[in-house]
Every structure is written in structure tokens, then in C-alpha cells.
Amino acid sequence: MHYHSVYNHTAGCRLIARMETKKANKTKGSHNRHRLQFGMALRRQREKQGLSQEQLAEKADCHRNFIGNIERGEQNLSIDSMVKIAKALKCKLGNLFLDARL
């Protein structure tokens, strides 16, 4: 294969990868918004109680980075994780959803 052929093939693969990423991001937009809304509600509740991410993580038996990822809307949560965090905050999971307006 010639240099130009390899270069064009590589550039084409990169272009396709970028297009697929943009398409995936568009379809995930509403999911990301929901995660961010839930994360913001979690942060408000945590700060209202005067807890750091680390303190909440310890109470919920998870890693501090996990709490940070949730609060930034980067983490997709299982029901089990949501319940564990709500219990650690001593609040009802439904109240977090109401605060998040979900």
C-alpha cells in the first residue's frame, strides 16, 4: 500500500469515528440531561447536610470519584446505587427525583 493510500484510509477512519461519536452524543442527549439533573439534586442534598463527597461516599460504601461522577452527570446509576446513596443521605429516593424534576 502506498503512503497516500494509508494516509487516506487512516483519515477516513478518523472521520467515520468522529461522525459516529457525534451521532451517539445526539441520541444520548436526553439521558445525559437526566443524569445531570439527578447529580445536581444529589449535590444540593449533600451540601445541605454539610457532607463532602468523600464523607458521603464513605456512608454509601462507594468511592469518592463515583459520587463526583454522579454529580457531574457522567455516571449512569443502577437502582441499587441510588438507594444506597439515598439511605446514606437519610432521604427518600423519590425526593431526589422530585428535586431533580424527573
Image (tube, grey):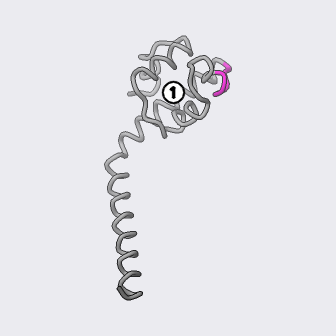
Q: Quadrant of the C terminus?
A: top left
Image x and y of residue 86, in percent: 50, 17
Q: Is residue 20 above or below residue 98?
A: below
Q: Amino acid at mark 1?
A: Ala
Count of labels shown? 1
The residue wearing badge 1 is 41
**Residue 52 counted in the magenta span:** yes
Which residue: 37% across, 63% down?
17
**Residue 101 counted in the magenta span:** no
- Could you say which quadrant of the image residue 31 lies in? top left
Q: Quadrant of the N terminus?
A: bottom left
In this rendering, position of residue 23 left or right of residue 76: left
Image x and y of residue 62, in percent: 56, 25
In the rendered structure, which segment of residues is drawn in magenta? 50-55
In this rendering, position of residue 26 left or right of residue 85: left
Which residue: 60% across, 17% down?
59
Within 10 Å of the Cα at label 1, are there few (<14), some (14-19), or many (20+) other Cα atoms?
many
- Could you say which quadrant of the image residue 64 lies in? top right
Image x and y of residue 72, in percent: 53, 38
Which residue: 59% across, 29% down?
63
Which residue: 51% across, 13% down?
87
From this viewpoint, which residue is outermost toward the front? Answer: 1
Q: Secondary structure at mark 1?
A: helix
